[in-house]
Amino acid sequence: STSYYQEKYRPQFHFTPEKNWMNDPNGMVYYNGEYHLFYQYHPNSNVWGPMHWGHAVSKDLVHWEHLPIALKPDENGMIFSGSAVVDWHDTTGFFGGESGLVAIFTHADEYPGTDKPRQRQSLAYSKDNGRTWTPYDGNPVLAEPRIIDFRDPKVFWHEDTGRWVMVIASGQTVSMYTSLNLIDWEFVSEFGDGEGSHQGVWECPDLFQLPVDHSTDKKKWVLLVSLGDEPDVEEGSKTQYFVGEFDGKTFVNDHDSAKVLWVDRGWDNYAGVTWSDLPMASGRRVFMGWMSNWRYAIDTPTSTWRSAMTLPRELSLKTTREGFRLIQTPVPDIESIRNEGQTFEDMELKSGGNLFKGLKGNALDLELDLDVTYTGSVRLGLLQSEKEETVIEYDVSSSTLSFDRRRSGDASFHQSFAMTQSITLNVPDGRLKLRVFVDWSSVEVFGGDGEVVLTNLVFPGEESLGLELSTDGTAYVHKARVSPLKSVWKQV
Ligand code: FRU
């Protein structure tokens, strides 16, 4: 008998494929009440190989239903990353005047008779809510032989200019193209030379508008760019962002070009992009990333599946003294799977005590709101046993949040994995706010208002369920909540 979603390390409320290898989220689009998630998928093995698009749908971004593979390698090559849109007004002519879904993705193969990589952009369409897909018979629709790394098209409708816009990785830059029908594309601009980080090949861009400080009229454009793994970069692959203006053709960075802004300060959030076609009125922009790192992704000790996605996160922008910063908030629907937990309110936590003593779990939603004015540091221990623990610590005098996974469990599968890291988190008025999600093999930390996020994998044993909240002085607990979360997967 099969038993899905009960294997060692198996996430209970994050998206994972039933079995085999997954990387980037692809083609995320909302249509007829369903959130579609496609993903880079190798259906025959637990490591990367000829890429397909796996497929799942959800009505709430929390519970997912697996669907058959949507796209598979064909005479134009493997199916690399890309996006999907609703063609509301049948600009393509694929839908006989109705609306339908169009996927825009990279076909990857080699120039005939050589081993030189060839990456060209293609289309596929679906007339039945994404259940079946037809590759366009004019594929590929966009080729650029001068650029080797030319992939991961993200397409959206630009209202003001009445055109489709494609942003696509082009080596160490992104290029913008426009189109009236998704088939014929015109190059309009390139961005990236001398901007941000160039520590790795640029991949998986996304470009969208976000409200600033929850305002209804002030908006800025955000450009996400992932950076591939390079051996001399300590943290492996990661994702940066830019904030600026976009007029339908050209993106202009508002910030100092040398300043690098990271989407996530943890090591395990890569190739993330956002959902297309969410209802405009909702003003929502929801992001999801691949919860792994090219440095060690093929070595992680899971079977028969490999890799999970991050929690879906709502994005917004906040004005700070240093400029605009991305804010991430887990989607509120996650609250629907909370079991009754424990909440501590309005009390003192003194040195020597463990507020979470006796509490246990490895599928948890934790919320901390502490006054740390009269203490040196606060320690949150997760997934503890005698031998193992994952430690999150806040040091008040240096305003640093650290994450230590050196003793988190199995960390021996790759030499880069057993790391500890430290980042700045300012706590205005001494108020430390953390929201933390634990899902057996991952920990996501949202600091402050969500301006600092750490997403890290861990591989603790099944007995490592202990929790600790302690301090070396006196911390005031405005609120400390520990809620177990239910599995969203049907267990067969
Ligand atoms: C990013 C990436 C993409 C590519 C895909 C291939 O993780 O390298 O650039 O399209 O993975 O699976």
Image (tube, grey):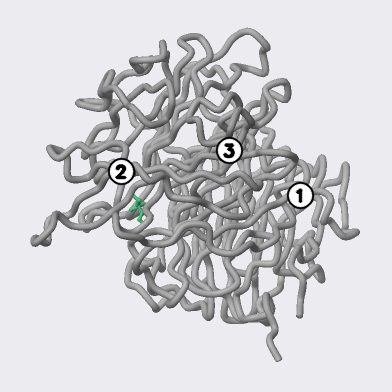
* Residue at mark 1 to residue at mark 3: CA–CA distance: 17 Å
Q: What x and y, as percent, mark residue 409?
A: 53, 76
Q: Quadrant of residue 8?
A: bottom right
Name which of mark 2 and mark 1 comes first in the sequence. Answer: 2
Rendered residue at 29%/31% (across/down): 174
Residue 489 at least partly seen: yes
* Residue at mark 2 to residue at mark 3: CA–CA distance: 24 Å
| 412 relative to 125, above or below | below
Q: Which residue is mark 1?
A: 334
10 Å crowding of disc 2: few (<14), some (14-19), many (20+): some
Between residues 447 and 299, which one lies in front from this camera angle?
A: 299
In which quadrant will I find the N terminus? Answer: bottom right
Q: What x and y, as percent, mark residue 143?
A: 23, 38
10 Å crowding of disc 3: few (<14), some (14-19), many (20+): many
Observer-side mark, 1 or 3, equals: 3
| 347 relative to 295, above or below | above
Farthest left residue? 114
Please name the amino acid that badge 3 sits on: Trp
Please name the amino acid that badge 1 sits on: Ile
| 386 relative to 249, above or below | below
10 Å crowding of disc 1: few (<14), some (14-19), many (20+): some
Rendered residue at 49%/48% (across/down): 26
Please name the amino acid that badge 2 sits on: Pro
Q: What x and y, as percent, mark residue 312?
A: 63, 46
Rendered residue at 52%/57% (across/down): 70
Name which of mark 2 and mark 3 comes first in the sequence. Answer: 2
In the rendering, which numbered label is found on residue 275? 3
Is the CB–ligand 1 distance for label 3 below 8 Å?
no
SS class, disc 2: loop
SS class, disc 3: loop
